């Protein structure tokens, strides 16, 4: 398994281009199952998760081809399709469960393997399945697969009250509802920019959707959807991750394609910590205000709150802040696995359940550390860039899931970082 070696260095300067959003692309791709016409996605990120979704869609009978070195995806799905999403693929990536709604909407039946838990939590699908049941689907769990069937062959509109603003459930139900008979209302829907991006794409395909981006989404079912060409929205999590690079290392970096409205709550926390974020015509410029990082408290919440996917990276910044910060992780039950690794680098962190208390130290020290999940791995790299000495981050395949060309992007602004291929 490859590892990444980082030598702590000085201030950064230059520009980092931000790619299309992984978590938008992973829900836009299954939308091809809803139509017989071609769907073209531009600004697609080049990531292993996208390759996994491609493998899954091809296994269902969709055609997926890539152009412009993977930045453009051409998808189409005509004729009869296979409605069984195999465990072998689904276990690699939870987002595979986003084929459930589209398969049910298109074919009236589906067998989708339960994704199983992952490092950050159990990640059940009860909100997805309870909601589809309200739309007339019979779903039972057998041999690790969800066996789903729409009574009468097609789903019907329903009023659905989500117990939690689940991103994936909002996406699955929104896609399923586009072809259901009648109107579906989702109350307490997720409001993430990726939800709005999916709604924009579905509307371009002919869907009737209102209220995306708010807690109440209304979808009027239609008989069929057409094709579309859609540009994947900028990845706000990659954006936030790289905004922390100059914050942690000093200097000034411009994030090309970044906009503050994608990360309002995160930018407010950076401001409170002493980081200036300025919108430019090409993106966002980020630099420390006066050299000192102040401690801030962070609680992760559904959008528009502070994103859970930036909690680990924010912790890397707060390890050397002036004072004590309290981070509360309210979305996932086990998302502090980066803490023991940061402690190996000399951080002062105490974790109790869903709360981590970080007391700033002067400087971290390089050490061999282990990547445990996608966002934890990049937080270790950020911390290592300003640490004393050398850090070797192992199991970096996690990184390839969500960060394209991470070494090149960080070297481009002056980081001393390289990838070591393990035989
Ligand atoms: C999406 O996951 C993202 N993944 C996650 O990003 C992100 O952390 C998460 O939303 C929250 O923002 C993709 O978009 C592919 P949820 P998702 O359904 O849809 C519980 C990354 O690093 N829940 O909003 O799975 C669940 O267990 C990844 O890019 C239920 O209990 O998130 C969790 O505690 C990690 N029952 C919470 O809700 C359900 O039926 C949030 O889950 C569904 C979810």
Image: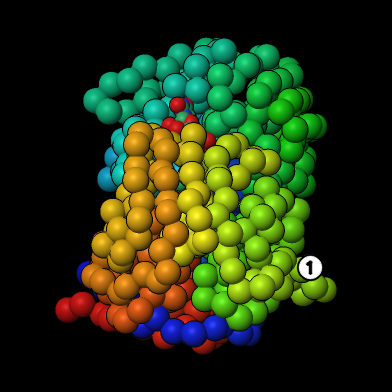
Is 394 placed left or right of 215 in the picture?
left
User: Which quadrant holds residue 389?
Assistant: bottom left
Q: Residue furthest right?
A: 281
On the image, numbered disc 1 is attached to which residue?
279
Residue at left offset 56%, top offset 19%: 163
Q: Is residue 137 visible?
A: no
Residue placed most toward the observer, 242 or 390? 390
> Image height check: is 339 above or below 17?
above
Residue placed most toward the observer, 51 or 249? 249
Is 237 placed left or right of 381 in the picture?
right
User: Picture coordinates of residue 360 (x, y %)?
Assistant: 44, 59
Residue at left offset 69%, top offset 58%: 271
User: Picture coordinates of residue 67 (x, y %)?
Assistant: 57, 72
Residue at left offset 52%, top offset 70%: 248
Quarter in which the N terminus is drawn: bottom left
> Image height check: is 204 above or below 134?
below
């Amino acid at each position: 398994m490859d590892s990444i070696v980082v030598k702590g260095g000085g201030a950064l300067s230059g520009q980092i281009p931000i790619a299309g959003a992984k978590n938008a692309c992973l829900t836009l791709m299954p939308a091809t199952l809803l139509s017989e016409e071609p769907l073209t996605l531009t600004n697609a990120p080049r990531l292993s998760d996208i390759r996994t979704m491609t493998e899954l869609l091809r296994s269902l009978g969709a055609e997926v081809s890539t152009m412009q070195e993977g930045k453009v995806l051409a998808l189409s799905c005509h004729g009869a399709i296979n409605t069984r999403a195999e465990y072998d693929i689904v276990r690699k990536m939870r987002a595979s469960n986003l084929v459930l709604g589209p398969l049910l909407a298109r074919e009236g039946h589906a067998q989708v393997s339960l994704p199983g838990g992952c490092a950050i939590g159990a990640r059940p699908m009860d909100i997805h399945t309870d909601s589809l049941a309200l739309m007339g689907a019979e779903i039972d769990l057998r041999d690790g697969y969800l066996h789903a069937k729409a009574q009468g062959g097609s789903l019907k509109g329903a009023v659905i009250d989500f117990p939690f603003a689940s991103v994936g459930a909002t996406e699955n139900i929104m896609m399923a509802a586009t072809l259901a008979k009648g109107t579906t209302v989702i109350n307490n829907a997720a409001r993430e920019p990726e939800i709005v991006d999916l709604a924009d794409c579905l509307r371009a395909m002919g869907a009737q959707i209102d209220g995306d981006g708010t807690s109440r989404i209304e979808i009027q079912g239609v008989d069929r959807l057409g094709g579309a060409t859609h540009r994947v929205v900028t990845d706000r999590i990659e954006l936030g991750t790289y905004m922390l690079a100059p914050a942690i290392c000093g200097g000034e970096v411009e994030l090309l394609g970044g906009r503050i409205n994608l990360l309002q709550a995160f930018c407010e926390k950076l401001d409170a910590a002493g980081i200036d974020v300025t919108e430019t015509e090409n993106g966002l410029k980020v630099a420390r205000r006066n050299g000192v990082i102040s401690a801030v408290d962070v609680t992760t919440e559904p959008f528009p709150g502070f994103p859970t996917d930036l909690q680990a990276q924010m912790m890397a910044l707060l390890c050397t802040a002036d004072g004590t910060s309290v981070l509360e992780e309210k979305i996932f039950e086990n998302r502090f696995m980066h803490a023991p690794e940061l402690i190996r680098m000399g951080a002062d962190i105490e974790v109790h359940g869903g709360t981590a208390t970080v007391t700033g130290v002067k400087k971290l020290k390089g050490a061999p550390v282990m990547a445990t999940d996608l966002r934890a791995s990049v937080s270790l790299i950020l911390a290592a860039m300003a640490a004393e000495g050398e850090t070797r981050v192992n199991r970096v395949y996690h990184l390839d899931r969500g960060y394209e060309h991470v070494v090149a992007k960080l070297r481009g602004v002056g980081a001393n970082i390289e990838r070591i291929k393990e035989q």
